[in-house]
Amino acid sequence: MTGKFDVVIVGAGLAGMQMLHEVRGAGLTAQVLEAGGGAGGTWYWNRYPGARCDVESLEYSYQFSAELQQDWEWTRRYADQAEIMRYIGHVVERFDLARDIRFHTRVEAMAYDEADATWTVRTDTGDEVVARFVIMATGCLSEPNVPDIPGVKTFAGDILHTGRWPREPVDFTGKRVGVIGTGSSGVQAIPIIAKAAAELVVFQRTPAYTLPAGDEPLDPELQAAIKADYAGFRARNNEVPTAGLSRFPTNPNSVFLFSAKEREAIFEHFWNRGGPLLLRAFGDPLVDPAANEVVAEFVRGRIRQIVTDPEVAAKLTPTHVIGCKRICLGDGYYETYNRPNVRLVDIATHPFEEITPTSVRTGEGSHELDVLVFATGYDAITGALSRIDVRGRDGLSLREAWLAGPRTYLGLGVPGFPNLFTMTGPGSPSVLANVLVAIHQHATWIGECLKHLADNGIRTIEATPEAEHAWGQHVSDVAAQTLLSSCGSWYLGANIPGKKRVFMPLVGFPDYAKKCAEIAATGYPGFALAHDPVPATQS
Ligand code: NAP
């Protein structure tokens, strides 16, 4: 099948869905190409037991329609995967999105044609779609990381990945299950699998700091109060560096202005309240290693209190800077290691040696298993972009252009790739903000940009190399003012062997959003704009 549109949007996750709405609003035609069988992106694929958002529901929602945000009633403080999928289904129907989405269609390649200033997008179904603009809404956490452990292909039991969970429920009853990975996905799945399985072996490389999520039914009075001034609520959240939780402002004072007893009481309060608020209890834990250590030590103390076996508690105790890997939220995570059917294997000390048809062998021994769950995360931020063969001007490959680390201007445009936009791309706040807010900001900015180009007869927009270079430096400089790059996180690409280590997201949503608005208001400096050729006069 072929087709010609103003815009191709790659991905029908939360970003692609809003982008489609904005493109229609700009009066342009669009086709969304989506590998999955339905909309929802990461939520479509992440059906693992316990999958739940770690951003509060009233904030992890669209703000482009005042009516939608008034009408939709969230039921939990943090929505689970099923509730988010109901919301996604509602949005698809309410805004009649599906008529412009081709499901079961994975984009494999795209190439820019200089003469026509168009992109030709090719898919695994043999479709060829031509468009003036391409918007990559491919998601920051969508390309699974499946470690190549020797012998993994010989395993005779079921192999699952949290980020590609089957649609049919998986029954762990009576099974011997191994889970590899203890990041956000593992931390949510492990307590639930442990309850069903006969035995659970958790293979942990780096212990995570896990705070109680404090999930609970959503307080109807809170929901009503926020809905009474949703616009004001959103505006206040936009002024917070992470674009959220303005109800809980960061205490600007140093940890060291408080006595040990006062600090303990403050930490205790935030621990019991649930959520990632512990890092807001004081102003300096993400910039001062000594202050960070005080917060980290509080969490370590909690682990020692909860986990009854001191050896297991020691293995579960993280030593890295708290907050430099994303904080995990999970209810009942540490308690799970007190169960008699759960065993923790430290693969940092005793690495994997081999997977056989029936077992996983590490330096510490062999574990007979029926099911192996990879909770090993993603090739984050650039993975989904790099797996597509994107060819810009003169056949320039995006994958190759980014071998030394991703380069963008504003996380939105790349030199050599005219009329291509990357939503929540590297160099934008993306995963360091409430990603729904980051999506909203990009979708509305791109929508307005497309309208500006159409209204002014502009044929192409392309980031300049100078702007991209200066922006890359800015992203690194801002990260260097924090402790965020002090450990081997996926923000840096450190979880993927061979991936160049570059801190990819930009710290600080409010300044970024203001900068983007200023750029749009002043004629898009840093982008080269080329006008439609003037038609030759008839002689
Ligand atoms: P992740 O945070 O990258 O965690 C992956 C885990 O697998 C880590 O423990 C990692 O260890 C381990 N691992 C990776 N490669 C390995 C290997 N070769 N051998 C052994 N262990 C290996 O991935 P995730 O848990 O899927 O979460 C990714 C992000 O998705 C989160 O940070 C969050 O932003 C988002 N997420 C959010 C939610 C939510 O909203 N609640 C839920 C799930 C995911 P190392 O730490 O040593 O690399």
Image: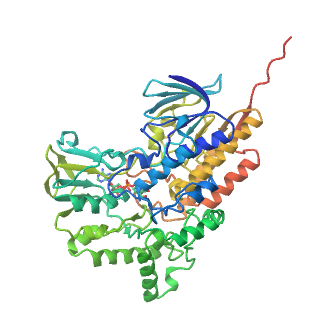
| Residue 10: % across, % down | 52, 37
Question: Where is residue 184, by image quadrant?
Answer: bottom left
Q: Is residue 162 left or right of residue 362?
A: right
The residue most toward the top is: 539
Q: Is residue 471 left or right of residue 337?
A: right
| Residue 366: % across, % down | 13, 54
Relative to 418, does residue 40 appear above or below in the rendering?
A: below
Question: Where is residue 69, by image quadrant?
Answer: bottom right
| Residue 444: % across, % down | 65, 48
Q: Residue at x 32, y 44 (%)?
A: 166
Q: Is residue 311 left or right of residue 167?
A: left
Q: Nearer the viewer, residue 169 or 398?
A: 169
Q: Nearer the viewer, residue 129 or 493?
A: 129
Q: Residue at x 58, y 47 (%)?
A: 411
Q: Residue at x 50, y 86 (%)?
A: 258
Relative to 401, does residue 187 appear above or below in the rendering?
A: below
Relative to 357, does residue 112 appear above or below in the rendering?
A: above
Q: Is residue 289 left or right of residue 150?
A: right
Q: Residue at x 46, y 82 (%)?
A: 266
Q: For the C terminus, which image quadrant?
A: top right
Q: Quadrant of ligand 1?
A: bottom left
